[in-house]
Amino acid sequence: NKPVLVDPKGSDFSIYKHATLITPNLSEFEAVVGHCQNQQQLVEKGMNLLKDMDFKALLITQGEQGMTLLTPEAAPLHLPTHAREVFDVTGAGDTVISVLAASLAAKKTLAEATILANMGAGIVVGKLGTATVNTAELEYVLQGQRAHDKGIGTLKEVKRAMQLAQQQGEKIVLTNGCFDILHPGHIRYLQQARELGERLIVLVNSDDSVKRLKGPERPVNNLQDRMEMLAALECIDWVLAFENDTPQAEIDLLLPDILAKGGDYTDITSIAGHESVLANGGEVKILSFIEGHSTTSIIESIRSIEVE
């Protein structure tokens, strides 16, 4: 029952049959399965290889394109390279399998071990000659990643964080809105959304988007202020902005497990992104309406005070 990790050589992978994890680079992988025209084909051929060889996992390293982890029971995990500059690729493969082995021995999940291996490879290729990576260097890179583990992020950063969370069995919930003047109705609604899963993403309309939807006097609070307030809430994991009137494009890329909207919606077909989420096996939820609170009523109340 001991795990067997293999950094393969040659084009006959049958000699590694039943291995726990095998880590070919792209050239080694294509020597066995044939040329892959795109990432989708790489995944398809990789899944077939997993099945044929009874591997528990397959990690394909792809140089500047990062690495892709495939397992029979989980969605593919693709990690972009962590290398800022590449000086020498010597020893990168050795680093990957070494960090994987050490991480798995330390009881890390396979997804976590792959993240660490990707970081280690990124460090090593930034050095000249055959090089090693130490724990201090990994910790330094990890500190940078933790800055993006929660809070305001880019679409690429949030997608990568989502993938890691899903690999660990966490359910991702997504909602969106202007959130111009944050009030108790917003808070309760966001807490409801978070209760549907383990992670909550909030997409926020840009200032121009709010103006188009709400009028020239809105927003009251600019985008950065609105995002900072949302990111400070314990129930929210990731916050990012979108420019269009709806976040259709962002939802199509992120594909959350659950798409949630407030109770002022009555028909899920009117919710942006519902088609792609449902087609991907996800759910669309309309949350209960929170009465007595709205940004518009707050603005009108302030104006009435000014008139008096």
Image: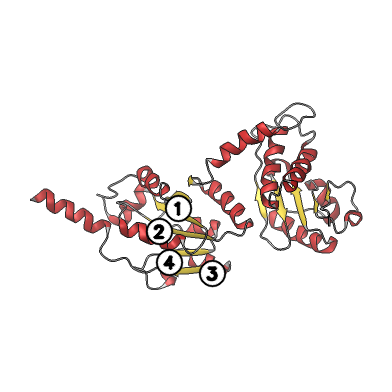
Q: Earlier in the sequence, mark 4 or mark 1?
A: 1
Q: Earlier in the sequence, mark 3 or mark 2?
A: 2
Q: Residues within 10 Å of mark 1 (few under 14, many from 20)?
A: many
Using the image, tell me which numbered label, if any, was put on residue 190: 2
* Outermost residue to the top: 128
Using the image, tell me which numbered label, if any, was put on residue 278: 3
SS at mark 4 in the image: loop
User: Between marks 4 and 2, how big is the CA–CA gap?
Assistant: 17 Å
Q: Nearer the viewer, mark 4 or mark 1?
A: 1
Q: Earlier in the sequence, mark 3 or mark 4?
A: 4
Residue at left offset 27%, top offset 56%? 295
User: Between marks 4 and 1, how big is the CA–CA gap?
Assistant: 21 Å
Q: Which residue is mark 1?
A: 236
Residue at left offset 71%, top offset 49%? 107
Q: Nearer the viewer, mark 3 or mark 2?
A: 2
In-image side of 114 versus 51 (left or right) = left
Q: Amino acid at mark 1?
A: Ile
User: Between marks 3 and 2, how big is the CA–CA gap?
Assistant: 21 Å
Q: Which residue is mark 4?
A: 271
In-image side of 159 versus 57 (left or right) = left
Q: Earlier in the sequence, mark 4 or mark 2?
A: 2
* Outermost residue to the left: 308
**Proximity of marks 3 and 4: CB atoms separated by less than 8 Å:** no
Q: Residues within 10 Å of mark 3 (few under 14, many from 20)?
A: some
Using the image, tell me which numbered label, if any, was put on residue 68: none
**Proximity of marks 3 and 1: CB atoms separated by less than 8 Å:** no
Q: Earlier in the sequence, mark 2 or mark 1?
A: 2
